[in-house]
């Protein structure tokens, strides 16, 4: 793999001397960027490009070239790969477009490409890509002319599923003085894909942070597995999340859409940082250069009152607190005041103190505090103001050294921004000894990203939660630590079928859905609490069953062809006695199909808190567990979250803390707090079901009603995979 | 007022020749910025600053100076104002800090200031401010040294409640080549406030857009009134919205916090654009220079597939659609393709077309379409690439002229961004003939801001809603247009008290809350539908009342000292017959206080959709109507919205479309769509109540249950203002 990035020689196939030829730009870019290996142009017509003679007879290619870059019409790529193979070339970048992204049926060019590569054991990047930009070797294979002069080396590498974005991140990371090591444009990723390159970059000495721009995630499980083992932070910008974008994404890189809720949960589970713009990539790259953030307690200081107010708003928005500082420290800092006209608080308005010495004192004393985890700092800057700081500090590098030194000394991050003319901010960024953010809001955002990364794998609650829901999360976690053994989980009173039997029976009958009754039988076999219920087919057995279950009861007509029971008046709730039961059963039997008139007699589970849980099988991530608010709010609020199975307890707690309505689980309005250990077991069981039962396509438990403090599956449906393939 | 901004002469009070003197910077700043009027320094000690002799005997000040800028210790400000008054000065900027923001009790400095100003009829800005920067006159009163050389004139003026922010916006608007006309730092706004300056700027020829940075809104109604009449867009950054920020905001500008949900609703009602960062101010200023956006249908074009995907995601995120283009147009554009390898869709990947002519053709044809309202365009730029566009287009001004010309021709906005090295983006911005945004996401954000402004006063639904909820909004609106006359609104069957009587009675009894029964009586008098109910005090009358109301019924113990009825088991729901009623009444009477054992016999309103509505009286905005999701979700989801009373129908529709759970109002899960005309009347009535009843402090209707399709107040509480003042 290393020779893809550091080839001793490359052949560029498709070069012409004409002004509109694109392949020749590849040669130009490599030369400009200082690539010192051999570059051999191959083309149809003779000529000289950038001092290199075009080889028109491919047979004249020398043996053992490290890398071929191919930009010829798609129907010729196979032939050119054959030539490469015959010349002992085992690595190729196929830049050519016009594959499945353009025409996804009967694409003979694609099979030609694949067959030829297989025949000659050629590994390739692309097609439909611009290949590699490597500041370490000067390799620069994009076929558009690039100004490589301002590219900067840096600790970041990027895997990018778009040529334009690949170019832009190279510029943007350089403009921001972060620099980059490698940019890899992977295009349609027919052979080498993001997984291959993440593996390479994890071992690459020059790479400290791995960034991805993806329009599709194909093998989500593999991605999660690698990310889980990566000692380097992985950051993903996943686009193509809207129906609008999917129209063009398909024709761009043949990318199919992912279910974005699943992507969200999966990336979080894998400890991958997700960003949504290139700009946020930049902010992240700077944030990850700061010392680890161990908690949420910040000191916010600004030389302007207005910016200290905005810092305070941003801290709260991003889930941080600004604890009150010790009175003795406040008094010491106030002693530096000039006019004595500003009170010191946290956030702190430093506007009345015109002394670098005082600022350094305050920064050190604040960061030294045990209950402070980091700082956000917004400094005014301009040559006129710098004079106030004293001559030495007017040098930008000295100024940054002060902040870098303090941050290092206490091993705590300072989110640093300047309010100043833009050119000074850019000059400060260029010093590059400590990260400088564009504005106060961005500095807090950066600290939040750092927090998210610092806490990954420790399964902290979602970072956008309020203080309140966080403390609830802590409570939830403490409950789960002492999982009780003696839970009465299986509430099913019937045992006629074991869980697996109902599935086998349904498959034998050619059905793809289990009835409500069967579904609950199956769930109960995994210890998921379900309603106690009996199936009956006539009025007499109905009354007997009702006695067995005990009033109040619920009656449900469960003919297999009636899906929406409620809408067809086939559900009668809260039947309190025999009279009501008789009247209700008459109604139900009259509505139902005569040939299939099974009625479910069910305990009435009372509770105003309705949850939902389930399982879906995602094409890219496999079985995924769903949890969220149920009942009529399920469809309306869509307050749901997914995690990829199998889950562990922390995944479950994270799911619970992620939903917006999680407060509903605590003791509200005179109701008991929900027994989280039961809820945890239900979600763990759903994950287990997904892993153990290939035949199950989908499970939907809605509502999962909280009865007292215990969640019970009140309605459920299991959907099987279609048998015909 | 004009002389504040264009004074013929100014006196600066508090000047010294020492290096630490701040007031002398004011003189320096004015000189640097080209102020040509007289500047007269006044100070304690003789000396010369910037070529001006300090007057030490204030009596020597000439008569009739237009403006005094005062920076002396706060206890001396009163005396200096007296001098100003005696010299015929009627305008002052009081820069001095140390007033209520520092010490809010017994602040004699503040009363001295106010008394002296009143005595001499001096209008002043501040205290605790840096005054005015006016690119039109060169007046520049900040007391920190400023580099004014890069300030640019522009069509924007800003009113800022923070000195640091005032400086920064002057720099930022200049750096972005928007420029500014006037920046006004208003500090504690003890005399002239944002209202005074908005009024001035509305009439100011040099101002086209009015921006505010505020940490508090004191007279919210006045602000809304002025904004409602302003022909110029008003944009507000309201900070101090968190508890964290409020700690420092109070000591910064003595700003008290506002209820931010009310601020949100009120600004929207008044057609004020709200932004949350200085950067968003910049984006807004550029957006508002574009032609009006008349709808939500955009064409998204990029020279890179990746950016066209990201444009698509951003369009959907911000509530835009990208309609399919006519097949004939697609074919024409595709005929320009070079490799013929990219399909044309909307969003459109222009990566395969290397021709300026083709791009111009596509832009014109797309914008000419009737069903397209605007465009977002992301162009690759660099000198190497510019060559492809042809020589003429390689000049940046020519290139921008093309886009500006097309936008003007079709009178539709183009949200334009470039992917390029930063320096080229900055050069393109500097051309300044058409707005250039930093990146594709920002360009769509800008178009969204433009949309919000274009649609203000037409009460479009909240711009973050999905297509689905928007179409629902249209439906809602169409329903309301045919308000039925024959609504059975008043469901109350008792008439013993008129609405006003119950309030008078409560006030007479010294109570500050009405009972549930009284509250509903009052609401019913405003035609708000309430439950049918009767008050009883013993079992016999209870049974009679139940017969009158009709089973099923609800019993509620309504002793006045028991607030949380549910939690005290004083509510029994769904009582179906006399037996159940007798059993229930025994329980309730046994729990209740013997001396006060009134029980409410109420119809049982069934319905799983629970809403909430109410009224609060805000100290800054007066009576405000609340609407949102009720029941157990009210506290948990906090999905509520406010508008300032009185409301009109469009305000109500906007409220309804704003809540996240608004889908609950449509026909979901077999339930009827809610009768929006009744809901509208309820919210209008609450606003009317707020305007007509000064004695009412608060009303809470929760739940407002949707029975069938009709909302009914099932529980309600009216709280009165405390009588003792």
Image (cartoon, coloured by chain):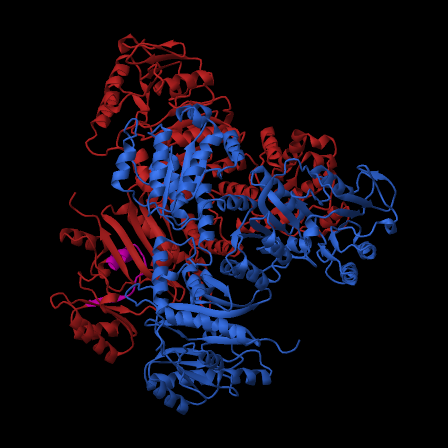
Chain colours: A blue, B red
Residue that extends furthest to the left in the rendered view of this protein? B595
Q: Residue at x 34, y 31 (%)?
A: A358
- Image quarter for residue A34? top right
Q: Nearer the viewer, residue A103 or B524?
A: A103
Q: Can residue A628 be seen?
A: no
Judge whether A98 appears above or below A15 on screen. Answer: below
Is B240 displayed left or right of A417 in the figure? left
Residue B520: say if magenta: yes
Is B425 displayed left or right of B184 in the figure? right
Residue that extends furthest to the bottom in the rendered view of this protein? A540
Query: Which x, y percent locates residue B166?
Result: 41, 30
- Quarter the N terminus of chain A occupies: bottom right
Query: Which x, y percent locates residue A115?
Result: 78, 62
Q: Can residue B25 be seen?
A: yes
Q: Residue at x 29, y 20 (%)?
A: B72
- Image quarter for residue B36? top left
Is A257 displayed left or right of A494 in the figure? right
- How many marks do you count on the picture? 0
Q: Nearer the viewer, residue A519 or A192?
A: A192
Q: Residue at x 41, y 12 (%)?
A: B50
Residue A127: say if magenta: no
Judge whether A195 appears above or below A690 on screen. Answer: above
Judge whether B497 appears above or below A208 on screen. Answer: below
- Quarter the C terminus of chain A occupies: bottom right
Query: Which x, y percent locates residue A665?
Result: 36, 65
Report the span colored magenta. B519-535
Is A633 displayed left or right of B105 in the figure? right
Q: Nearer the viewer, residue A585 or A36?
A: A36
């Amino acid at each position: 793999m290393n020779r893809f990035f550091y080839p001793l020689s490359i052949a560029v196939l498709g070069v012409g001397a004409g002004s509109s030829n694109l392949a020749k730009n590849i040669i130009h870019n490599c030369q400009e960027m200082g690539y010192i290996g051999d570059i051999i142009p191959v083309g149809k017509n003779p000529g000289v490009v950038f001092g290199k003679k075009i080889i028109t007879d491919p047979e004249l290619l020398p043996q053992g070239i490290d890398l071929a870059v191919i930009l010829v019409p798609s129907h010729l790529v196979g032939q050119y790969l054959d030539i490469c193979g015959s010349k002992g070339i085992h690595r190729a970048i196929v830049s050519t477009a016009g594959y499945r992204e353009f025409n996804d049926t009967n694409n003979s060019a694609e099979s030609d490409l694949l067959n030829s590569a297989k025949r000659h054991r050629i590994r390739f990047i692309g097609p439909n890509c611009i290949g590699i930009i490597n500041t370490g070797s000067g390799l620069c294979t994009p076929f558009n002319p690039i100004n490589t002069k301002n590219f900067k080396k840096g600790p970041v590498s990027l895997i990018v599923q778009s040529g334009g974005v690949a170019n832009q991140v190279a510029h943007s990371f350089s403009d921001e003085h972060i620099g980059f090591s490698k940019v890899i444009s992977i295009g349609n990723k027919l052979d080498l894909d993001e997984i291959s390159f993440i593996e390479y970059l994890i071992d690459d000495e020059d790479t400290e942070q791995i960034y991805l721009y993806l329009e599709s995630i194909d093998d989500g499980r593999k991605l999660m597995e690698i990310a889980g083992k990566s000692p380097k932070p992985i950051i993903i910008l996943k686009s193509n999340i809207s129906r609008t974008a999917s129209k063009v994404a398909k024709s761009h890189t043949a990318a199919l859409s992912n279910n974005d809720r699943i992507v969200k949960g999966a990336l979080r589970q894998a400890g991958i940082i997700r960003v949504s713009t290139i700009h946020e990539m930049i902010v992240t790259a700077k944030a990850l250069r700061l010392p680890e953030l161990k908690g949420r307690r910040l000191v916010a200081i600004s030389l302007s009152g207005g910016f200290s107010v905005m810092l305070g708003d941003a801290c709260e928005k991003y889930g941080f607190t600004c604890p009150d500082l010790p009175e003795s420290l406040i008094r010491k800092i106030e002693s530096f005041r000039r006019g004595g006209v500003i009170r010191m608080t946290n956030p702190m308005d430093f506007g009345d103190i015109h002394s670098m010495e005082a600022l350094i004192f305050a920064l050190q004393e604040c960061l030294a505090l045990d209950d402070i985890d980091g700082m956000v700092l917004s400094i005014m800057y301009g040559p006129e103001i710098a004079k106030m700081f004293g001559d030495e500090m007017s040098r930008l590098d000295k100024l940054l050294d002060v902040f870098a030194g303090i941050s290092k000394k206490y091993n705590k991050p300072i989110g640093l921004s300047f309010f100043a003319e833009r050119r000074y901010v850019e000059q400060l960024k260029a010093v590059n000894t400590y990260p400088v953010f564009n504005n106060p809001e961005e500095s807090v955002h950066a600290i939040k990203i750092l927090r998210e990364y610092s806490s990954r794998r420790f399964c902290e609650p979602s970072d956008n939660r309020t203080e309140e829901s966080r403390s609830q999360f802590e409570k939830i976690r403490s409950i789960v630590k002492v999982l009780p053994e003696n839970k009465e989980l299986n509430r099913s009173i019937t045992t006629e079928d074991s869980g697996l039997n109902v599935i086998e029976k349904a498959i034998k009958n050619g059905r793809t859905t289990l009835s409500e009754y069967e579904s609950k039988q199956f769930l109960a076999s995994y210890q998921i609490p379900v309603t106690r219920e009996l199936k009956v087919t006539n009025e007499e057995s109905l009354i007997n069953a009702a006695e067995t279950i005990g009033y109040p009861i619920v009656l449900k007509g469960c003919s297999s062809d009636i899906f929406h029971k409620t809408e067809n008046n086939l559900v009668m709730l809260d039947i309190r006695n025999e009279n009501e039961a008789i009247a209700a059963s008459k109604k139900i039997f009259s509505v139902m199909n005569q040939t299939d008139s099974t009625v479910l007699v069910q305990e009435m589970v009372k509770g105003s808190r309705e949850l939902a849980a389930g399982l879906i099988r995602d094409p890219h991530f496999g079985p995924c567990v769903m949890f969220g608010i149920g009942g009529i709010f399920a469809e309306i609020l869509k307050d749901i979250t997914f995690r990829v199975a199998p889950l562990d307890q922390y995944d479950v707690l994270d799911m619970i803390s992620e939903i917006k309505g999680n407060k509903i689980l605590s003791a509200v309005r005179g109701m008991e707090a929900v027994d989280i250990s039961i809820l945890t077991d239900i979600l763990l069981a759903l994950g287990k079901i997904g892993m153990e039962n290939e035949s199950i396509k989908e499970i939907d438990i809605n509502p999962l009603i909280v009865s007292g403090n215990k969640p019970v599956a009140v309605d459920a449906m299991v959907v099987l995979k279609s048998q015909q393939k």
